[in-house]
Amino acid sequence: MRSSNGRNSSGNNGGSRGGNSGGRGSSGGRGNYRGAGNSRDDRQGPKQGSNQGGKPADRRDDRRDDRPSRPSKPRPEERRYDVGGSDAVFGAGARKGRGAAARGGAKGGPRTSQGTGARGSRRGAPRRPASSTPGRRSATASAYAGKPKVSLPKTFPGAEQEGERLQKVLARAGYGSRRACEELVDEARVEVNGEIVVEQGMRVDPEKDEIKVDGLTVATQSYQFFSLNKPAGVVSTMEDTEGRQCLGDYVTNRETRLFHVGRLDTETEGVILLTNHGELAHRLTHPKYGVKKVYLAHIVGPIPRDLGKQLKDGIQLEDGYARADHFRVVEQTGKNYLVEVTLHEGRKHIVRRMLAEAGFPVDKLVRVAFGPITLGDQKSGWLRRLSNTEVGMLMKEVDL
């Protein structure tokens, strides 16, 4: 039979579920144990009772009661530290740091000074270096009293010399690092004013001295050299008053003023050079130095076998004879011919006029080489900077 106080009416007498007197209920079994009104003494029940087997009562509750009572630790969010009163603990001269200890967030709260003497009281003050004490200063002054004062040089030895080191000039010109330029000197590949350099550290004047690497002149000043694959329809001027597309449109973002070397017809494509080196540009276009230009022309045939001989012997034009240095047929497709014409003159429309006078008007003309500078795979409208080797080859062409 169930009672109103719990599941087993004989909870104290060791029923089927409450056999142990110190078990789940003392006066009514499990029901009263789980109730909200029972105190700790009620839950423990009579400790001197025995179970059905005559064994002593469970000792776990006895051991729990025999432990010394400890104050329960507060939760982390309940901890409070008196940070505001740090002056009272550390003294009025204590530093207010920004670390965890100063904020009071470190475990255990802010640290206090452990020392009670002079060292502990000066924990917050900056230490004075040992050499600044009066005794150390006097000892240092007496140790160096009889020695002469040494004046150190303000610059390195040789800095008062004129000019720049050769390897520095070569490195600035783009021949690699200074160490790589020193290796060029060791390999006897550098010459200054016609003499091979055999020692390191030579000083030169980039404005006056002639420097060559592997026989090619080095552009030591701030010169710029570009090759443009000029498209058809672009005027060979740096500015155009009529608003047409011109060469200057490709170099508008350059700080240094550039100018073109020679000209190309508006409808002619191919290589045209841009630079700020006036003497080089003058010599490249002067007939005296004979810098060759190579053109590919598309004409319609059939062409005679002696067309090349006619062009080499000279074609009479309205402004005089014009002679080609070389002529050859590159490709033939039916009546369409692709011919190569090489000449060193630079008169206006000279290739078109020569072939038209011979009876073969030009449909399309492309300049594929200007001296040692070739078009290669450079796309139409692309501008590229010439390498140091190409610049040296250009200067060698005109004896610079």
Image (cartoon, grey):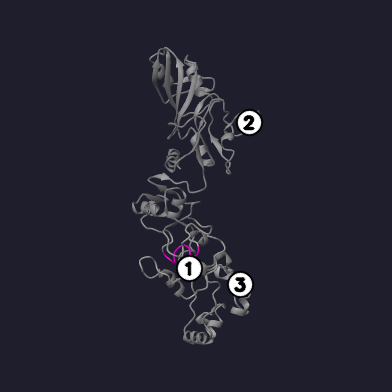
Is 283 in front, or is 391?
A: 391
Is 247 in front, or is 190?
A: 247
The kind of residue tagged 2 is Asp
Tags 2 and 1 in contact by the CB under 8 Å rule?
A: no
Q: Residue at image x 48%, y 77%?
A: 150
Q: Which residue is mark 1?
A: 44
Q: Please determine whether, in this image, residue 81 is positioned above or below residue 297.
A: below
Which is nearer the N-term, disc 2 or disc 1?
1
| C-alpha span from label 2 to label 3 | 79 Å
Residue that lies at the very extreme toward the front in this rendered image = 1
Tags 2 and 3 in contact by the CB under 8 Å rule?
A: no
- Mark 2 or 1: in front is 1
Q: Was residue 16 drawn as part of the magenta stretch in this picture?
A: no
The kind of residue tagged 1 is Gln
Q: Position of residue 223 (x, y in %)?
A: 52, 44
Circle number at residue 240: 2
Which is nearer the N-term, disc 3 or disc 1?
1
Q: Secondary structure at mark 3?
A: loop
The image quadrant of residue 372 is top left
Q: Main secondary structure of the magenta part?
A: loop
Mark 2 is surrounded, within 10 Å at the Cα level, by few (under 14), some (14 to 19) or many (20 or more) other residues, namely some
Q: Which residue is mark 3?
A: 83
Mark 1 is surrounded, within 10 Å at the Cα level, by few (under 14), some (14 to 19) or many (20 or more) other residues, namely some
| C-alpha span from label 2 to label 1 | 109 Å
The kind of residue tagged 3 is Val
**Which range of residues does the magenta coloring cover?**
20-27
Q: Secondary structure at mark 1?
A: helix
Q: Please determine whether, in this image, residue 238 is positioned above or below residue 326.
A: below
